[in-house]
Amino acid sequence: MLVTGGAGFLGFQVVAKLRARGCPEVLIPRSREFDLCKKEDVSRLLQRVHPDLVIHLAAVVGGIGANRRYPGRFFFENAMMGLLLIEEARRIGVEKFVCIGTVCSYPKFTPVPFREDEIWDGYPEETNAPYGLAKKMLLVQLQSYRQEFGFPGIYLIPVNLYGPGDNFDLETSHVIPALIRKCIEARADRRKKITVWGTGNASREFLYVEDAAEGIIMAGEHYDKPDPVNLGSGSEITIRALVSAICEITKFQGSIEWDASKPDGQPRRCLDTTRAEREFGFKAQVTLDEGLRRTIGWYENLLQGRSVVETA
């Protein structure tokens, strides 16, 4: 079994759950040995491992700022990794390929909740369109390969993830870890305010990383159809309400300065999750409040130098 990105934020949880299920050998390719954007490296990797199952999690990702700064890199590397891995997996006869897409592939003004059949109904939100389109091309590839070659690939669309082990670098992080870090640092420095991008009016849906890992494994075990499947919690929150919740849990009591010169990103995000529940029984278990408390507790322990365990 091969898990690309298996040492990353989501990959750590997926690999831990696979091992807990008794998978005899889970192999994690490292970038220092295999550049997944190079055909010769991908071919060498799959020829050496010859896995029966591939879970493709490796991706170049970031928040709105990173997407605006590196659109070319995000498009090329995400597309190339997936295209090469799927082709080589087909060529050597991999028995199952699980590809992780992104909610950024949906059109900017998709009606809420987002249904999988609406993924082609418009252009993605501009700030993350290159990333979203690169990932969506892998859905086309998998469906085409299933039609022509009978290749057993499935495509999952997770919503925004968060949890222990997330990226807290303010230059490249997503919204939840960035807000947590800003609040904790402002509280420690006794600052009276923090600045948050946008107006606060955009909405998002968030899925705790352990839930996402469980959904991926359940799909790998029980789903084998060409149609994409959403993975989410099915609940929506505005960024303004999210900031308030994080301020309360972190005990930051200062004010919020909204920088409306910065983009909100997609106006709304909330997934229809009925297909995942119907097809393979997945339903998120961790509420946003509980997930935020776990994530904030993990990060504060990390800052204080305490032992941190990333549970799975």
Image (cartoon, rainbow, N blue to C red):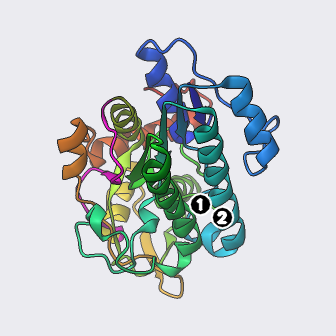
Residue at (27% x, 50% y) in the render: 233
Residue at (55% x, 43% y) in the render: 57
In the picture, residue 107 is in which quadrant? bottom left
Q: Position of residue 158 (x, y in %)?
A: 39, 52
Q: Position of residue 160 (x, y in %)?
A: 42, 56
Q: Earlier in the sequence, mark 2 or mark 1?
A: 1
> Looking at the image, which is closer to me, 257 or 291?
291
Label 2 sits on what residue type?
Answer: Phe
| Label 1 element class | loop
Residue 74, labelled with which disc? Answer: 2
- Relative to 125, does residue 242 appear above or below in the rendering? above
In the picture, residue 311 is in which quadrant? top left
Q: Position of residue 140 (x, y in %)?
A: 48, 61
Residue at (33% x, 32% y) in the render: 218
Residue at (34% x, 39% y) in the render: 224
CA distance for labels 2 and 1: 9 Å
Query: Looking at the figure, which quarter contains the N terminus?
Result: top right
Q: Which stretch did the figure color magenta?
A: 222-239
The residue that mark 1 highlights is 62
Would residue 282 be visible to someone looking at this image?
A: no
Provide the major secondary structure of the magenta segment: loop
